[in-house]
Image (tube, rainbow, N blue to C red):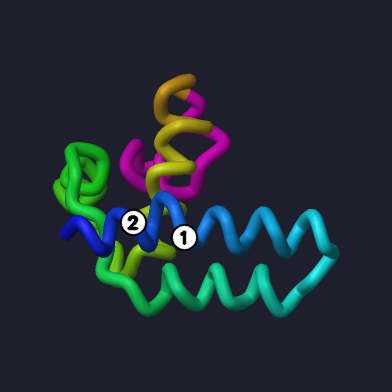
Amino acid sequence: IIINGFLINVLSPIIYHKGIEENRLDLKIKAIQILKNTNPESNRFTRIWEELGVKPQNAYDSQGLLEIYQQLCTRKDCLNCLIGKNVLKL
């Protein structure tokens, strides 16, 4: 669990940021591959998604769901979210 957290929250973002700074696509891809090859995080946010029937397969998915939660759910912007529309049956 500690290694997963390190890969997800420290190593991958550092590599991705370096890719941005150096304009290197290979580093950005490497950072994304790390997330895709790492188990998803398990926390209260991922458990909320799982209760809604959305189960992350890897850390790339769990980070994406966390971002959706932060950008849309916390702002109650469900109508601009495909998942929110589905949950609301719109």
Secondary structure type for disc 2: helix
Residue 73 position (above or below residue 50)? above
Nearest to the observer: residue 83 or residue 60 = 60
Q: Dot 2, crowdedness within 10 Å: few (<14), some or many (≥20)?
A: few
Q: Which residue is mark 2?
A: 6
Mark closer to the chain start, 2 or 1: 2
Instruction: Work out which quarter of the rendered image holds the N terminus and state it.
Output: bottom left
Whether tag 2 and tag 1 are in contact, CB under 8 A, the answer is yes
| Lateral position of residue 89 relative to residue 25, left or right | left
| Lateral position of residue 5 relative to residue 90, left or right | left
Instruction: Work out which quarter of the rendered image holds the C terminus and state it.
Output: top left
Residue 6 at what x, y percent from top left? 33, 56
Secondary structure type for disc 1: helix
Q: Is residue 42 magenta?
A: no
**Amino acid on which the number 2 mark rests in the picture:** Phe
On residue 89, which mark appears?
none
- Among all residues in the image, which is located at the extreme right? 23
> What are the residue bounds of the magenta stretch?
77-90
Which quadrant would residue 58 be assigned to in this image?
bottom left
Helix, strand or loop for the magenta stretch, by majority: helix
| Lateral position of residue 8 relative to residue 42, left or right | right
Nearest to the observer: residue 67 or residue 12 = 12
The residue drawn where x is 80% and y is 55% is: 21
